[in-house]
Amino acid sequence: MMIRQKFFSSLLAKCLLLWLVIQLGSACTRERLKVVPDNDAPWYGDVPTILVENYVNRVFIDLLGREPVDSEMTVHVQYLRSGDLSQARRMDWIRMLQTDTVPAAGDSSYQAVYYRRFYEMTKVRLLEGVSDAYILGQIGILRFGIQVDSLNGDTMAVNQKREDVARYERIMQSEYDYRYGRVTLDSVCARMVDNPVYDFINMNSFNFINATFDNLYFRFPSQSEFERAYVMVDASQPSTLFGLPGSNKSDYIQIVVAQREFWQGWVMWAYKTLLARDPSTSELYAAQQQLSTDRHFHTTLLHILISDEYANFHP
């Protein structure tokens, strides 16, 4: 009888121990599998093909300045579909369009066309879309003038024309220098506002200063900012702007493109151009942080182009 009681007592203790282990494991499992509301991964399987084709077409136009041919449309739609239209797949696709060096559909490469498109859009923003043909024509006129001035012994005129030729050439060279990483976007814009075309569009120092602020910052200078800049640009006298010293027009340009607000201006331009709206405070801050850190504007574009808002996908 005593042995039987001990047996049942031992069996009961083991059962209780097993039950306790099961309960603890179940509690841990429930904790690990706790569902977070509204945190489901988006499902894009129901997005109509026509919307995917519209997305591909829009990206091609915005990034490359042309529509895809039929074969490209088929391949790129299939590629996006094979990745369930996820933002990760969209990101890989956009990066391919920005960086691929393989010849495609009559183009030298997607990369070459992408940087050509960006160069042209930058000229639209800052130089009213002046063509390279016009720039080359002006260079030809200047070089002829250099020959005439040399024969006449006018050294000062020769030097001025040579400098203008160099400023024109730096505009066109910026496409390739930016593409191959020899300069960053701030240097490209410095070239775009330091040339005879920009001077002609924005004649006199008053217009030049207001134009650089408006074009690059999307605002006009304060009275104090204008007065400090005017001393540099018009009088070539020492002054300070944004806490930085300068004494001529070239110094002023370098100060303007060195500001954090310069990168903010590019973020605003991207949102206005691609989404037809201003960025929110959080969007502006995130993009500005990224740009001021790595200065890669193509990354800023990528984050906009993969968004559901831009793609018009509503999972």
Image: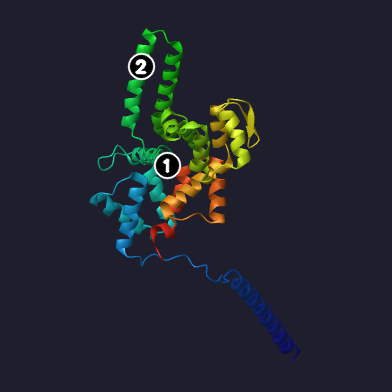
Cα gap from disc 2 to disc 1, whole angstroms: 30 Å
How crowded is the residue under tag 2: few (<14 C-alpha within 10 Å), some, or many (20+)? some
Badge 1 amino acid = Arg
Residue marked by disc 1: 125
At which x and y percent is residue 272? Answer: 45, 52
Q: How is the image coloured?
A: rainbow
Name the quarter where the C terminus is drawn. bottom left
- Mark 1: which secondary structure? helix
Name the quarter where the N terminus is drawn. bottom right
Q: Can residue 183 be spotted in the picture?
A: no
At which x and y percent is residue 197? Answer: 41, 31
Of residues 299 and 167, which is closer to you in this image? 167
Image point 47% across, 46% down: which residue?
299
Q: Earlier in the sequence, mark 2 or mark 1?
A: 1
Of residues 24 and 6, which is closer to you in this image? 24
Image point 29% across, 62% down: which residue?
50
Q: Is residue 194 above or below residue 21?
A: above
Residue 41: assigned label: none
At which x and y percent is residue 313? Answer: 39, 62
Q: Quadrant of residue 78?
A: bottom left
Image point 47% across, 43% down: which residue?
297
Q: Quadrant of residue 221?
A: top right
Residue marked by disc 2: 145
How crowded is the residue under tag 1: few (<14 C-alpha within 10 Å), some, or many (20+)? some
At which x and y percent is residue 274? Answer: 41, 52
Q: Is residue 175 above or below residue 26?
A: above
Q: Is residue 110 above or below residue 198?
A: below
